[in-house]
Image (cartoon, rainbow, N blue to C red):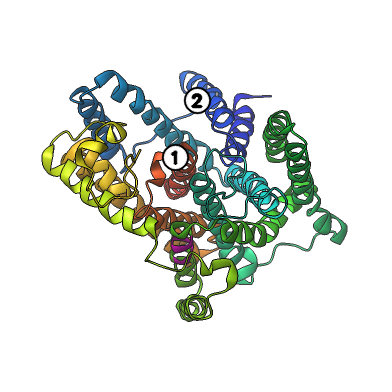
Amino acid sequence: MNLERAQLGLLAALAATIPVSIFASEAILALALAVLAARLVAGRAHLLRTPLDTPLIALVVWTLLAASFAQDPARSHEDSKKLLLYALFYLGVEVLARQDDRERVLPAVLLGGLALAGLIVAQHLFLGYDRLDRRPAGFLGHYMSASGVTMGVLLLAVGRLALGPRSRGSRPPPADPRVRWGGFGLPLLVLAGVGAVAAATAGGHGIVATRVCVAALAALAAAVALSRSPAARAAEAALPVVVVPVAAWALVASQTRSAWIGTVVGLSVVALLRAPRLLWLVGAATAAVLVLRPAALTERLTLGDASTSDRYYMWQAGVDMVLDKPVFGQGPGMVLAVYPRYRWPEATHPMQPHLHNNPLQVAAERGLPGLAFFLWWAVAVFVAAIGEARRATAEGPGGAAGGALAALAAVFAAGLFEYNLGDSEVLMLVLLLTAVPFALRQGRAAAA
């Protein structure tokens, strides 16, 4: 196997494991970066400059400076190791610039997302994760991380269905019906594996079953991406059809309002790209939920609960943190240590590891300059994503660009109520999807 194919297989395995295992995805990322380094040395890969380079470098440098001025620099620098994950963006741009590779890696995200959503549903139905104080987290360590990743996967799948080739009348050549319907075998196999994990968990053997499932998922994603068979392509086409209902069910079961808000924003983006009049459907469906208040959502459709109140007071504490140290902030990872000093007496919880808001968290940790660099990076991401999504939707199938834009919009909207970029799983998914518009641009330049 040559280095290019090894790179493709590793990135597909990485994409599939992001929703199910931090350890596996970070280990595969290290291997993929090693292969990319070998290709760069051999002159078989090239990293081009992007509009994100300057704000990203500025954010990294300022983060390290903020860590140096924290009350516990060693601990703050330890927390800053997460900056290494941003290398995934450059890996993604290099690999996803090739259309065939892009159309093999993005379905791998759906493969892992289907496993996560499937286990969330199984936990909700059969393992007693059906209360507000016991919410399903799937393969991940916390239900907030699980709901954030599920939200992104759902919108990527919706984008591929609504903006892909079939949505524009440019249908691919007819395939053998047996191959086409056989494509559903892969998602059904994943769901069967998830069912086995749930059964093993109920029997007290969940850790071993989970490890086996994660390893099998990584191997399966790499094999499908590297396969040249029509059956593999049929399986990739079938994945979003299965992912959408399962992920939607999982989001309802998660009872996570920030993810619901992000989903509405993401669906609105897809509607705008597909046909602006479809926004009426999104608005009507949202209004119907608010009026009818279905039983599955009723408990969470309120602003008078303790969680909402506590967010208000922790945001006030975050503002006080910024006012106290506006230049370098409290330092990365230091909010938990300093929160008691700034906590308002009305706050429900005495301790908070973060401030449930991405911009406020960045400002509290890294000061106002850090916030400026973060917003610069985010604006550059969305300028590129919007431009490529509009171009792709106008000129041809826009499933990749449109789905990535919808998922990114959802994550950033949800991030106004949750520090979701502090979760490595969500951050890695965001970085991979952030690479899509820049990869499209690079691929177009290479073909010119």
Residue 88 is inside the magenta segment: no
Q: Which residue is mark 2?
A: 33
Could you tell me the amino acid type at mark 1? Asp
Q: Position of residue 323 (x, y in %)?
A: 12, 44
Marks 1/2: CA distance? 21 Å
Tell me which label, 1 or 2, sits earlier in the chain: 2
Residue 423: which numbered mark, if any? Answer: 1
Q: How would you classify the magenta stretch by its main secondary structure?
A: helix
Could you tell me the amino acid type at mark 2? Leu
In this orientation, does residue 373 appear? no
Above or below for 170 versus 419: below
Q: Residue furthest right?
A: 178
In this orientation, does residue 261 appear? yes
Q: Position of residue 184 (x, y in %)?
A: 78, 54
User: Which element carries disc 2, helix, strand or loop?
Assistant: helix
Residue count near mark 1 (Cα–Cα under 10 Å), binned few <14, some 14–19, many ≥20? some
Q: Nearer the viewer, residue 273 or 256?
A: 256
Q: Quadrant of the N terminus?
A: top right
Residue bounds of the magenta highlight: 260-264
* Image point (37%, 66%), residue name: 304
* Image point (47%, 57%), residue name: 259
User: Which element carries disc 1, helix, strand or loop?
Assistant: loop
Q: Position of residue 79 (x, y in %)?
A: 35, 27
* Image point (47%, 23%), residue name: 40
Disc count in the image? 2
Residue 263 is inside the magenta segment: yes
